[in-house]
Image (tube, rainbow, N blue to C red):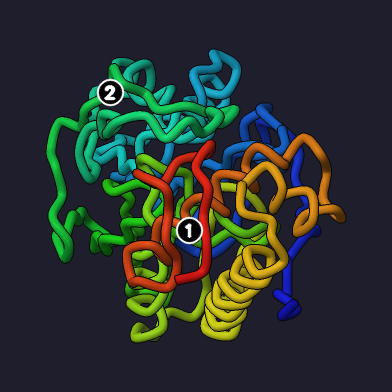
Amino acid sequence: MTAIPFVKDIDFAYGAVDRLSPLIRRVIARNPGPFTYTGSGTYIIGQDHGPLAVIDPGPDLTEHVDALMAAIGSATVSHILITHTHRDHCGAAAAFAERTGARTFGGGPHPRQRGNTGAPALEEGGDLGFSPDEVLADGATVECDGWSMRAVATPGHLPNHLCFALTSEGALFTGDHVMGWSTTVVAPPEGDMGDYLTSLDRLLARDDEIYYPTHGAPIRNPKAFVRAIRAHRRIRDGQILDQLKRGHTRITDIVPAMYAEIDPRLHPAAALNVLAHLIRLVRIGEVTCDGEPSAEATFEVA
């Protein structure tokens, strides 16, 4: 397996404001877990006196919203930017917007599930009640005095996933598309592995100097990191094909063999990743399936 240069260490205190650069501050919510690592990091962009942009206001926790309000002080928040519509990213958007008067911007409402794959749900689900005040297309720019942010469409984890580029600092806020502490869960039916790999290629064509994911520490050598993630996904394809050749034709047989080294609590997420890989492999003709690809289906090498 390709060694991904994970960034596991992060120095923070819940509710405290961390200064990461001249224009970037961060407050981490107290929602740690197997899918959120130490918790959701909310980024505050702009000079201390404002106007400010806030990226991913995080889960619907009063203490986190209170910490954000304390961090911004008397400054004006002009934009609330949402990378995607999982609750650990946008659950607090409505409460924060009400308290600041700011409008919300994102890639659209949460996608409605397309059929039933039989896959288990993630710990952090979609926020079906959230819809941004303004939908941002790929390349759309939002700006105020002192900063400018550009939306970069990165579907895969969700079809409405956006990254946000702060060009003046060479920074890209990557949401859940690229995280330093772990690979990203791509969970059908909302997640799509083909889209995810294409979005990784898109990042490789950019010249960002640093990534700021919503969960975990900054990634300071982003292109090498993305190359390692992409290689890891290709190796997973090969491992799945090998498992099929060994007669492990169902996901319930593949996951224990491939993921024996990880926390069993993450096996449901691993099953989703395997399903996402298999859907793509069926789509490109390398694998066949007895019907529609699902968690209960039987797969074979084509």
If you read the primary sequence from the N terminus, does the residue marked by circle 1 or circle 2 appear first? Answer: 2
Name which residue lies at 71% across and 80% down.
2
Residue 57 against residue 250 in the figure, above or below: above
Q: What's under tag 1, amino acid-wise?
A: Leu
- Left or right: 34 in relation to 106: right
Camera-near label (1 vs 2) is: 1
Callout 2 crowding tier (Cα within 10 Å): few <14, some 14–19, many ≥20: some
- Left or right: 89 in relation to 250: left
Are discs 1 and 2 less than 8 Å apart at CB? no
Q: What's under tag 2, amino acid-wise?
A: Phe
Q: Quadrant of residue 179?
A: bottom right
Residue 252 lies, in percent from the top left, at 68, 42
The C terminus is located in which quarter?
Answer: bottom left
Of the pair 101 and 213, the residue shown nearer to us: 213
Callout 1 crowding tier (Cα within 10 Å): few <14, some 14–19, many ≥20: many
Residue 118 lies, in percent from the top left, at 48, 30
Name which residue lies at 86% across and 55% down.
261
Q: Secondary structure at mark 2?
A: loop
Residue 147 lies, in percent from the top left, at 29, 61
Residue on which disc 2 sits: 130
Q: Quadrant of residue 78?
A: top left
